Image (tube, grey):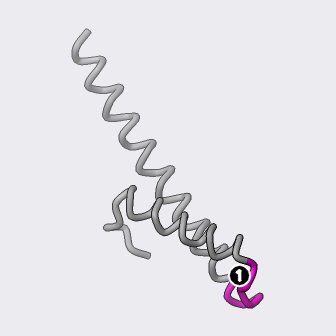
Amino acid sequence: MDNNETYNEAVEKLRKIVADIENGELDVDILSEKVKEATRLIKLCKEKLFKVDEEVKKVLEELE
């Protein structure tokens, strides 16, 4: 797992996985790996968005 991936890198990898799946030419074993990778990337994106949301809330509270 690469925790150094940026949000944009993760989203770009997700787009590629979706395109590969929509292409419909993936072997079942490869499809399984792609779904696992997509799940990891979605989790990473959610964590990054949550962290940014918390940081923004903190900054806004300090401004009040």
For the image shown, how many numbered marks are present on the structure? 1
**Magenta span:** 24-32
Quadrant housing residue 55 = top left
Q: Secondary structure at mark 1?
A: helix
Within the magenta stretch, is there residue 33?
no
Q: Quadrant of the N terminus?
A: bottom left
Residue at x 74%, y 90% (from the top left corner): 27
Which residue is denoted by mark 1 in the rendering? Answer: 32
Residue at x 47%, y 59% (from the top left corner): 11
Quadrant housing residue 5 = bottom left
What's under tag 1, amino acid-wise? Ser
Q: Tell me if 16 is positioned left or right of 8 in this view.
A: right
Quadrant housing residue 34 = bottom right
Q: Is residue 25 above or below residue 6?
A: below
The residue positioned farthest toward the top in the image shown: 64
Residue at x 61%, y 66% (from the top left corner): 39
Residue 60: where, in percent of width, then height?
29, 19
Residue 26: where, in percent of width, then height?
71, 86
Q: Nearer the viewer, residue 27 or 61?
A: 27
Q: Tell me if 32 is positioned left or right of 14 in this view.
A: right
Residue 46: where, in percent of width, then height?
51, 50
Within the magenta stretch, is there residue 29?
yes
